[in-house]
Image (cartoon, rainbow, N blue to C red):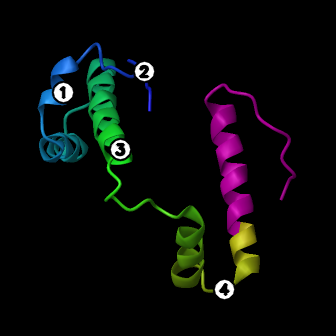
Amino acid sequence: MPGPIGEKNVSYPFLNRFSTKTLRQLLQEDFASKEPSTPESDTFITCVAEVVARREAANPNIPRFDVEAGWKNFLKGYCPEGPDAAGALAADITRMAAQWTHLQGGEQEDQPET
């Protein structure tokens, strides 16, 4: 999973010496921190997440998340109105994502007006 600094973590090679548990702790502490992020801290945390993700991808004992099953579970538990409501939810999410992209200065795809 290459990221902003690449496959070998050339900016932070020392991260490979930490245990996965320690790296996860760093991620949790960053998430809970009240300190504002900086581009440097964002890059560092991204590198930490990449090391964890590579280790987890290489470990066959870690179960993979089944997106389809997760979506069905979401529909059953959090969207009990049925598939029609799920379609409306998906349309809303698509519309909001397009609006966000537009607000960020990106290209906005043609979206039907609701």
* Secondary structure category for the residue under label 2: loop
Q: Which residues are magenta?
A: 89-114
- Direction from residue 67 to residue 22 in the image, left or right: left
User: How many numbered circles are shown?
Assistant: 4
- Amino acid type shown at disc 4: Glu
- Direction from residue 64 to residue 45 in the image, left or right: left
Rendering coords of residue 7 (x, y %): 39, 22
Residue 4's tag is 2
Graded by Cα atoms within 10 Å as few (under 14), some (14 to 19) or many (20 or more), the crowding at tag 3 reads: few
- Amino acid type shown at disc 2: Pro
- Point out the tag, 4 or 3, that comes first from the N-terminus: 3
User: Mark 1 and mark 3: span between their CA atoms?
Assistant: 17 Å
Residue that numbered label 3 is attached to: 58
- Point out the tag, 4 or 1, that comes first from the N-terminus: 1
Residue 81's tag is 4
* Secondary structure category for the residue under label 1: helix
* Secondary structure category for the residue under label 3: helix
User: Mark 4 and mark 2: span between their CA atoms?
Assistant: 41 Å
The structure residue drawn at horizontal position 87% and vertical position 52%, both measured from the top left corner, is 112
- Direction from residue 69 to residue 84 in the image, left or right: right
Residue that numbered label 1 is attached to: 15
Image quadrant in which the C terminus is located: bottom right
- Amino acid type shown at disc 1: Leu
- Point out the tag, 4 or 2, that comes first from the N-terminus: 2
Residue farthest toward the top in the current orientation of the protein? 10
- Direction from residue 81 to residue 69 in the image, left or right: left
Residue 90's tag is none
Question: For this rendering, which residue is in front, 105 or 77?
Answer: 77
Image quadrant in which the N terminus is located: top left
